[in-house]
């Protein structure tokens, strides 16, 4: 790693913190925000009839639960359990589309899970066609899905490509059989390789591979081999996440013996390895945890300072409002976040009664909007431009953020540590600061003041 990252810095700054897929984060959502509130926000969004939209569909089913998994998942071995779900998603889409009036044009459309390809190609085609009866795909839309190579066939990829899917993300995590044993997920090299090859042959425009470092049993030698294998495939993008060990939120992680997790020094070595191998292999680091080939649109957007981020991940579709369908999905419309019920029974009950299936949410105030913007800029482009913030929100940057700027410049603060530089132009994260970008962003989070370590969050590195 070319930056002066040390185990001491890691020890000091690797602490619980948000990933900032939203601001305020989901822990601030309240059950005071329910179906009626979401309904009026959808109607407010409908007033901008030509505005672009993103649509996320959560398909939560998996055949078994991997012990490391942090997603909202429903294990169902009998497909009939999952069949009932698709009808509910289409019913939900009808209710939402009605509230949105003429506003139906999707510039971003994504299926996540769970495992979307748990379903057969025929089921997925039925779902897709049903959704397109209610929404309309922009010809240039990003149409993406996550797949588990263990259950995804070439037929899945052919049907989905034929339906217009142009981006695909392969869950891999680690290629080493011993690590796979420890995380309860067995996936052969051949499964990964052949699916990647099929996606290339079928013309998916962007292929992403998900990896995780910090898993039990990983060593520098094993992880080095994993990275070498993936570099051989040369996906367009890589997401390399730090393992979020949060057994108090995800009880399935209790199956992992914490004594087998890499200690801080090893985790540091793994992090350094990721950066060295991927940057050395020609990839550009993107925001947090992500890498892309230099001609990938995310890499171009970051170089141009226009990269953005939402619940689906990094995107070039800045500021696009997002509607989520399915259990646990989080929408972001007209200045509010709204999360669907996580429990299937509650989700089904609401849909069957014709009610928007909202469990909780929050309405952003002006301060939230300002901080959401500066945190997003940091997480995506490593910079806060004072003039941009002043123009958008009619504030004086230095005055509004006086206490945050003082914290950054305090003795031994992030400026002294070489993580950020301050100037009249704003705040710039250094290369070192980009590794700790969640910590830099946390300085601007009003909800963390007074409690810098919240165990609800995963660790920042
Ligand atoms: S890691 Fe993927 S396949 Fe495993 S339980 Fe989680 S969502 Fe399902």
Image (cartoon, rainbow, N blue to C red):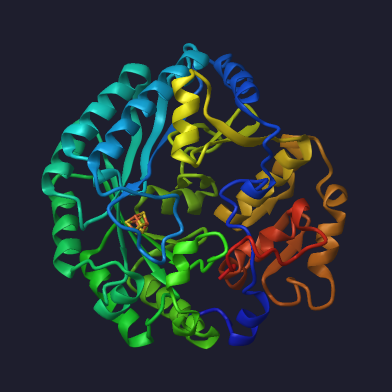
Report the front residue among 64 and 393: 64
Report the front residue among 444 and 3: 444
Relative vertical location of residue 428 with respect to residue 92 in this rendering, above or below = below
Report the front residue among 323 and 300: 323
Indicate left or right for 106 with 323 as reference: left
**Image location (x, y in percent) of residue 380:** 55, 53
Residue 459 visible to an observer of this rendering = yes
Indicate left or right for 126 with 143 as reference: left
Q: How many marks?
A: 0
Relative vertical location of residue 452 with respect to residue 166 in this rendering, above or below = below
- Displayed-image quarter of ligand 1: bottom left
Which residue appears at 45% of the width and 35% of the height? Answer: 345
**Image location (x, y in percent) of residue 184:** 32, 69
Residue 242 visible to an observer of this rendering = no
Which residue appears at 35% of the width and 63% of the height? Answer: 66
Relative vertical location of residue 224 with respect to residue 171 in this rendering, above or below = below
Picture quarter containing residue 13? bottom right
Picture quarter containing residue 90? top left
**Image location (x, y in percent) of residue 175:** 26, 73
Quarter containing the C terminus: bottom right
Indicate left or right for 425 with 459 as reference: right
Which residue appears at 30% of the width and 44% of the height? Answer: 116
Which residue appears at 37% of the width and 44% of the height? Answer: 60
Relative vertical location of residue 411 with respect to residue 319 in this rendering, above or below = below
**Image location (x, y in percent) of residue 117:** 24, 45
């Amino acid at each position: 790693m070319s930056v002066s990252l040390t185990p001491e810095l890691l020890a000091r700054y690797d602490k619980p913190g948000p990933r900032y897929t939203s601001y305020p984060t989901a822990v601030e959502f309240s059950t005071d925000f329910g179906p009626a509130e979401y309904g009026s926000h959808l109607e407010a969004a409908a007033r901008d009839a030509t505005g672009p939209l993103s649509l996320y569909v959560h398909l939560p089913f998996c055949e078994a639960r991997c012990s490391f998994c942090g997603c909202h998942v429903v294990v169902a071995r009998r497909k009939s359990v999952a069949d009932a779900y698709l009808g509910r998603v289409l019913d939900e889409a009808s209710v939402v589309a009605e509230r949105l009036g003429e506003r139906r044009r999707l510039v971003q459309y994504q299926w996540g899970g769970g495992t979307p390809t748990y379903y057969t190609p025929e089921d997925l085609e039925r779902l897709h066609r049903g959704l397109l009866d209610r929404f309309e795909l922009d010809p240039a839309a990003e149409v993406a899905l996550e797949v588990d190579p263990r259950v995804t066939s070439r037929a899945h990829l052919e049907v989905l490509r034929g339906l217009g899917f142009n981006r695909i993300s392969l869950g891999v995590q680690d290629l080493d059989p011993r690590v796979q044993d420890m995380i309860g997920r067995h996936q052969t090299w051949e499964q990964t390789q052949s699916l990647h090859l099929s996606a290339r042959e079928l013309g998916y425009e962007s292929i992403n591979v998900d990896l995780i470092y910090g898993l039990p049993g990983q060593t520098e030698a094993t992880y080095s081999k994993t990275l070498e294998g993936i570099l051989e495939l040369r996906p367009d993008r890589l997401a390399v996440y730090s393992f979020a060990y949060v057994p108090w939120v995800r009880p399935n992680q209790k199956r992992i013996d914490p004594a087998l997790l890499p200690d801080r020094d090893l985790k540091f070595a793994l992090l350094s390895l990721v950066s060295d191998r991927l940057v050395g292999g020609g990839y550009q680091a993107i925001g947090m945890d992500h890498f892309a080939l230099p001609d990938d649109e995310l890499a171009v957007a970051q170089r141009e300072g226009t990269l953005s981020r939402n619940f689906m991940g990094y995107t070039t579709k800045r500021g696009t409002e997002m509607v989520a369908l399915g259990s646990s999905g989080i929408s972001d419309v007209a200045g509010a976040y709204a999360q669907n019920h996580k429990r299937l029974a509650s989700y089904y009950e609401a849909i069957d009664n014709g009610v928007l299936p909202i469990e909780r949410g929050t309405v952003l105030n002006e301060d939230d909007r300002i901080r959401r913007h500066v945190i997003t800029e940091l997480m995506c482009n490593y910079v806060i431009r004072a003039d941009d913030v002043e123009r958008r929100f009619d504030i004086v940057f230095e005055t509004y953020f006086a206490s945050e700027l003082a914290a950054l410049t305090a003795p031994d603060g992030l400026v002294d540590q070489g993580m950020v530089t301050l100037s009249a132009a704003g705040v710039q994260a250094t290369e070192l600061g980009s590794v700790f970008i969640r910590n830099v962003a946390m300085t601007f989070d009003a909800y963390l003041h007074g409690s810098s370590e919240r165990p609800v969050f995963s660790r920042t590195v």
